[in-house]
Image (cartoon, rainbow, N blue to C red):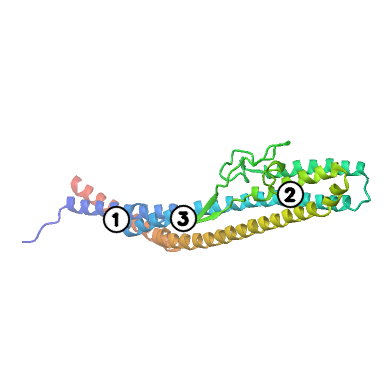
Amino acid sequence: MTERITPAMVRSTTLNDINSSLANLERTSNELSSGKTILEPSDNPYGASQVVELQSQLDGLSSYAANAQEGISWENTASGAMANVSNVLQTVRELLVRSSTGTNNQSDRESIATEVQQLTEAVKQDANTQYAGQYVFSGTATTTAPYTQGAEDAYQGNNGIITRAVGPGVSINVSTDISSLLGNGQGSADGKLLDTLRTISEHLRGGSAEDVSALGSTDLKSLETSIDTLSQLQATAGSVTDQLQTATSRIESLQSSITASLSNTEDANIAQTSIAYSTEQAAYEAALRAGASIVQESLLQFLQ
């Protein structure tokens, strides 16, 4: 027995074809407008899971990249401050050599002592350098100034280590122990920079033969020891900056690789999608014309 095809069945089939063509056209249109082939997880469950994983990796790398850049800025700030201290120490050295030759009278040495005292305060100001509102030489006590201005020379920070995470389980120490250079002043007799500078001022003001002799011997030697210590701190800071820059380059390389994988997974091929859109648009328009013809014929048959 042959099943009879009724006008209702034809209309239903035609309508389904039109709706199917429209759905395909809308899907392709969305791909073109978004540039993505995965518009919702059900489109490609495995691909969608890859997209989530790759995007998570990119987010993590962005955080590491920000840490590395912030670390570089932190180190640059610290290096700039130490460069200022280095300039001060060279000036003090020149003054010390000049005052120890015996060509200066006591009045000259008094004036030099005043200048050294001012330079000592300049060193402490550089030690109190801040980056983004944090003291870079205070260890983990970043809200506390390492040194106070005036006669008190005790270090106010701590020896805590500040690090920047630049990868899974990888952190770089960006701390600089400025107290290993400046020390705690003359009262501690630690022989470090502030102790040395205070002692130099004292000998300049003393005026005795022993004071003048100390300027060109023990005082100069102590100052040069501090200059060497500062050079070591600067070299360490430079090495840390190199590590952070290397980490930044590695992160950027990984970001490029993962971004390419993400693009391959979810990005639409615009050329192919455009061709598909044109084809589906033509199919949809043809379906509409065919449907209109069938509906008109059925209507005529009904009227007859």
- Whichever of labels 1 and 2 marks the residue nearer the N terminus, that label is 2
User: Which residue is found at the position 46% from the left and 57% from the top?
Assistant: 169
| Local SS, label 3 | helix
Marking on residue 15 = none
Image side of residue 263 versus residue 42, left or right: right
Q: CA distance from mark 2 to mark 3?
A: 41 Å
- Determine the CA span between mark 3 and mark 1: 50 Å
Eye-nearest disc, 3 or 1 = 3
Residue 21 in view, yes or no: no
Mark 3 residue type: Leu
The residue singled out by tag 1 in the image is: 290
Amino acid type, callout 1: Ala
Is the Cβ of the residue at disc 2 closer than 8 Å to that at disc 3?
A: no
Q: Secondary structure at mark 1?
A: helix
For residue 85, which numbered disc appears in the image?
Answer: 2
Q: Which residue is mark 3?
A: 58
